[in-house]
Structures are given as C-alpha cells and as structure tokens.
C-alpha cells in the first residue's frame, strides 16, 4: 500500500522516525527468527534420535511379546493380561521459549504393572512388559518434542513473513518516500531562494 504524506519537514521527521523503528523491528525479528531456527534444528535432531530409540524399543517389545505368546500359550496369555492393574498418569506442563508455550510431559504409573502371578507365565512376558514400561517415557518425550517442532515451525514461518514484509515492502517504501520528500523540500528551498533573489533584484532596481 502506497504511503501518502505531505511534503513538510514535520512529516519527513515522522517518516524518518517510523523508518528507524521499522529497521529496529526488522533487526529484532531477524534475531528472533535466527533463535527460533537454532531451537528448531536442535529439536529436529532430538526428534530423530528419540524416534530411532522408540523404534528400537518397540522392535524389542514385539520380539518379547512373540516369545511370550509362544511360551505361554493363548489361554494363559489372555488370562494373565485380562485384568490390568496399572494406570498411566500424565501431567502436562509448559516451557516458555520466545513467547511460545512448549509442552513438557511428566508421567507416573499407579498400581502394579504385572497384573498376574509369576508362576503361570514365562519370563518373556515379564520382559515384554518391562520393555514397554521403559518405552513409555521415551514415547511421551517424543510426543512433546514433535509438538514443539510443529509450534516452532509455525512461528518461524510467521516471523519469516514479517521479516520479509519489513525488508522488501515497508522499509523500501519508507526510504523511497523519505527521499521523495527530501527532494521536494530541496526543490521548494531552491525555488524560495530564487524568488528571494528576484525580489532583491527588483528592490535594487528601484
């Protein structure tokens, strides 16, 4: 949108102040964007590492489940797992980064994670449940990190658009308008001096 102001020294001063603020805002937004990118890349790396760990743990879990099913038998398996006694309680907290509320998940198990007597089942089932219990915190951390990555990517895009709007639209328009007003004022000043010289010449002629 074109900036329309009167060609006066007061308007030029206001325009220069606005330009100064725009440049300062541009620098602050660039610094914010760079910090967001640093945080984002760190979380992306962490996300990749956590995902690999979860995949490895789940592969181990499925392996133990297969062994447990083979050694225990379908009837004993169904009986052992028919009445779960443990509850997973998850608490959601938030960490503020660059005005973003990034989720932090805490958890605890309430009750007994082994809902059966050890005499009726094999150690493979115990191992499967232990692997799964140890995988839960990694899964929760992965979920929190993926949500944080999503929020940061949205904020980075929003900040990038603002930086570009200032850098390629507003600041060039303000600079062009300031230069135009400066040139107009210089022309008016030269015109005034020229009229003054003519008046002096007329006075001297008389």
Image: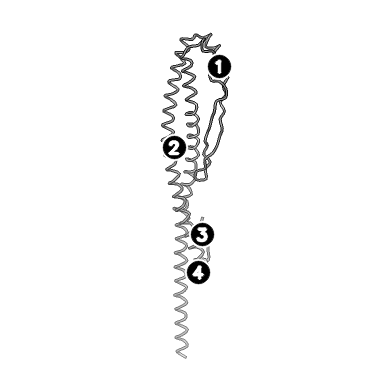
Q: Secondary structure at mark 4?
A: helix
Element under disc 2 = helix
Q: Which numbered disc flags the more N-terminal residue, 1 or 2?
A: 2
Picture layout, residue 77 above or below residue 157: above
Q: Residues within 10 Å of mark 1 (few under 14, many from 20)?
A: some
Drawn side of residue 105 relative to residue 190, left or right: right
Give the vertical position of 37 relative to 21 (above or below).
above
Q: Which residue is mark 4?
A: 9
Q: Nearer the viewer, residue 6 or 47?
A: 47
Q: Nearer the viewer, mark 1 or mark 3?
A: 1
- Label 1 with label 2: CB-CB less than 8 Å: no
Tell me where residue 90 appears, x and y as whole percent.
56, 30
Compare residues 105 and 9 and report the one nearer the observer.
105
Q: Check disc 1 and report the residue beneath it.
A: 115
Question: How many C-alpha atoms fall within 10 Å of the one at disc 4: few (<14), some, or many (≥20)?
Answer: few
**Residue at position x 47%, y 70% in the image:** 185
Return the residue at label 3.
3
- Residue marked by disc 2: 43
């Amino acid at each position: 949108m074109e900036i329309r102001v009167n060609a006066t020294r007061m308007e030029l001063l206001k325009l220069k102040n606005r330009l100064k603020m725009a440049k300062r805002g541009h620098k602050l937004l660039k610094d914010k964007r760079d910090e967001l990118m640093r945080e984002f890349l760190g979380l992306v790396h962490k996300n990749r590492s956590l995902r690999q760990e979860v995949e490895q743990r789940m592969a181990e879990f499925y392996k133990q489940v297969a062994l447990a099913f083979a050694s225990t038998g379908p009837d004993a398996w169904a009986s052992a797992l028919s009445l779960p006694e443990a509850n997973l309680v998850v608490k959601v907290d938030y960490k503020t980064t660059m005005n973003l509320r990034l989720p932090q998940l805490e958890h605890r198990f309430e009750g007994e994670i082994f809902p059966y007597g050890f005499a009726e089942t094999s150690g493979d089932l115990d191992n499967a449940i232990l692997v799964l219990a140890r995988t839960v915190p990694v899964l929760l951390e992965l979920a929190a990190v993926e949500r944080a990555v999503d929020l940061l990517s949205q904020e980075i895009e929003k900040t990038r658009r603002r930086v570009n709007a200032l850098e390629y639209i507003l600041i060039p328009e303000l600079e062009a308008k300031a230069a135009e007003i400066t040139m107009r004022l210089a022309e008016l000043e030269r015109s005034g001096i020229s009229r003054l010289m003519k008046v002096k010449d007329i006075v001297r002629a008389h």
